[in-house]
Amino acid sequence: MADDLKGKRVAILATDGVEQIELTAPREAIEQAGATTDLVAPHGGTIQGMNHRDKGDQLKVDVEISKARPEDYDALALPGGVVNGDHLRMDERSVEFVKRIGSQGTPIGVICHGGWILIEAGLVRGKTLTSYPSLKTDMRNAGATWVDEEVHVDHGLVSSRRPDDLQAFCPKLVEEIAEGRHEQKRAA
Amino acid sequence: MADDLKGKRVAILATDGVEQIELTAPREAIEQAGATTDLVAPHGGTIQGMNHRDKGDQLKVDVEISKARPEDYDALALPGGVVNGDHLRMDERSVEFVKRIGSQGTPIGVICHGGWILIEAGLVRGKTLTSYPSLKTDMRNAGATWVDEEVHVDHGLVSSRRPDDLQAFCPKLVEEIAEGRHEQKRAA
């Protein structure tokens, strides 16, 4: 398990208002499995983490979105937080980054309000996934099948609803990142 | 102008996290035009107003949604605030209330993130409206035509994008409430 992701690089895309535990818990799981991670954000410096309604830590940004190259990454993680999800989908470069990651068949982990950026990137049509329940109707209107499960996996897309689901989400995400891109699997 | 809305009763539906000025400014305009208003919320007591990211006032709830009757109101105002909009759409009774208000042809004013509850109530299909820009894709996926205007009116549905638009939003909303229900106009 400890070396399953050795040599892999994972982007975690977030902005101010991110639900902190939904960023730090997957990050820890991914790094413990041997991968390196980059916190990618629309701006440099730090982003403001949230512990639900209270301010959490300032989290150091590793790569500004203007310098992030989708082809450098073996997976993408999209944490939640209502303000994070709401703002990230309005950042055109972030949406384009996610779109290109998705078009590569790269595994994506998404939790809570992180799903809005997948809607914005046009990546949920025909997919089965979960999210924070408030996104259910937006997901369905965008062409997804929405399920109420602690974690759901659909062709490399790993989704969960909320912080309580992290214990199920993190190992599934690590497993999908280990499996790699879906095109590669089909080609093998 | 001062008596245009005399005898009318307007529901303002909101919950914790409401963008305070988007509740208080329309309320003031409506009351100055002679109507009475009720702050309707999923729970009794008070709701937490927000001044963007900072906490504002505790706002007194007049009517709990469980006791609110759509037929008692001549209009509905839906303020924004990202947390308000996100939570309100998950409250089934609030969604049902909005659905019934909409089915009566009652004028509705909506601003910013208030639009999510209209999506949830299935009231945007075929309508032209605006909202906070982050809702644009959700609105389009729900069957609306989204426009980037400070205020837009479509058959009694008055919509604006953000607090900066309030000066245009408030008088238009008062005007539409004065005109009354759209069925009534057609019947006249």
Image (cartoon, coloured by chain):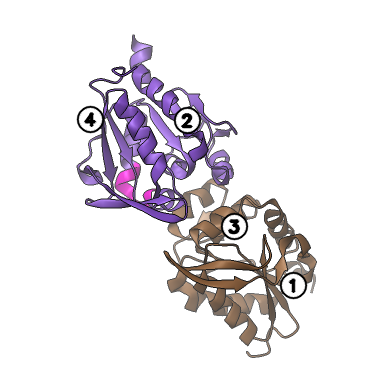
Chain colours: A brown, B purple
Do dots 2 and 3 share one subunit?
no
Magenta stretch, main secondary structure, is helix
> The disc numbered 2 marks a residue on which chain?
B
Q: Quadrant of residue A97?
A: bottom right
Tell me which numbered mark, 3 or 1, is placed earlier along the sequence. 3
Q: Amino acid at mark 3?
A: Lys
Tell me which numbered mark, 2 or 4, is placed earlier along the sequence. 4
Q: Residues within 10 Å of mark 4 (few under 14, many from 20)?
A: few
Q: Nearer the viewer, mark 1 or mark 2?
A: 2
> The disc numbered 3 marks a residue on which chain?
A
Q: Nearer the viewer, mark 2 or mark 3?
A: 2
From the image, tell me which residue sits under label 1. A185
Q: Which residues are magenta?
A: B88-95
Q: Amino acid at mark 1?
A: Lys
Secondary structure at numbered mark 1: helix
The residues tagged by marks 3 and 1 sit, at their Cα atoms, a distance apart of 18 Å
From the image, tell me which residue sits under label 3. A127
